Amino acid sequence: MTIAEASRKYELSQDTLRYYERIGLLPRVNRNKSGIRDYTEEDCGWIEFVKCMRNAGLPIEVLIEYVSLYQKGDSSLEARRELLVEQRTLLMAKMEEMKVTLERLNGKIDRYDQIYIPNQKKQKPKE
């Protein structure tokens, strides 16, 4: 798969894919005889993983560390697991904060619906 195809499939710009590879967020992508990136199924799996983790808010630095550990092989299994567990804990705390914020927003909207909307209906001129 070319970089253009990967860019379309994963809705990431080609520049973003190149950047991710350059900083070590994606393992080195193989190139064909002409020097053009040739994304394999494994490369695409990495793109999906990174995109998912970034969408959840994981820092680039953490993901770079994870990729670096992965490239060290099985000797880094425990370190990778610990890193993922730590990020899960942080993500769960963030989700709890977002839940509280959502509940507060819902309460405010409910108050508007109870006070503002009925008052608007009362002020409409009768026909």
Image (cartoon, rainbow, N blue to C red):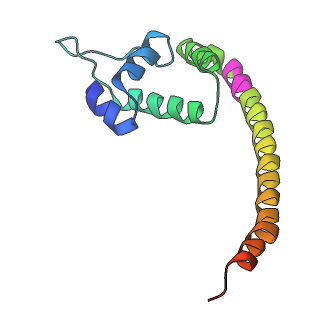
Q: Residue at x 67, y 81 (%)?
A: 125
Is residue 97 depicted above or below 31 in this figure?
below
Q: Nearer the viewer, residue 99 or 25?
A: 99
For the magenta stretch, what is the residue range? 78-84
User: In the image, is residue 81 part of the stretch drawn in magenta?
Assistant: yes
Q: Is there any visible trace of residue 126 in the rendered image?
A: yes
Q: Position of residue 57 (x, y in %)?
A: 64, 31
Q: Position of residue 14 (x, y in %)?
A: 34, 23
Quadrant in which residue 22 is drawn: top left
Q: Residue at x 61, y 89 (%)?
A: 127
- Please give left or right for residue 102 compared with residue 53 in the image: right
Which residue occupies the extreme left position in the image? 34
Quadrant in which residue 1 is drawn: top left
Quadrant in which residue 17 is drawn: top left
Is residue 103 depicted above or below 89 in this figure?
below
Q: Position of residue 38 (x, y in %)?
A: 27, 22
Q: Is there any visible trace of residue 27 in the rendered image?
A: no
> Of helix, strand and loop, which mostly describes the magenta segment?
helix
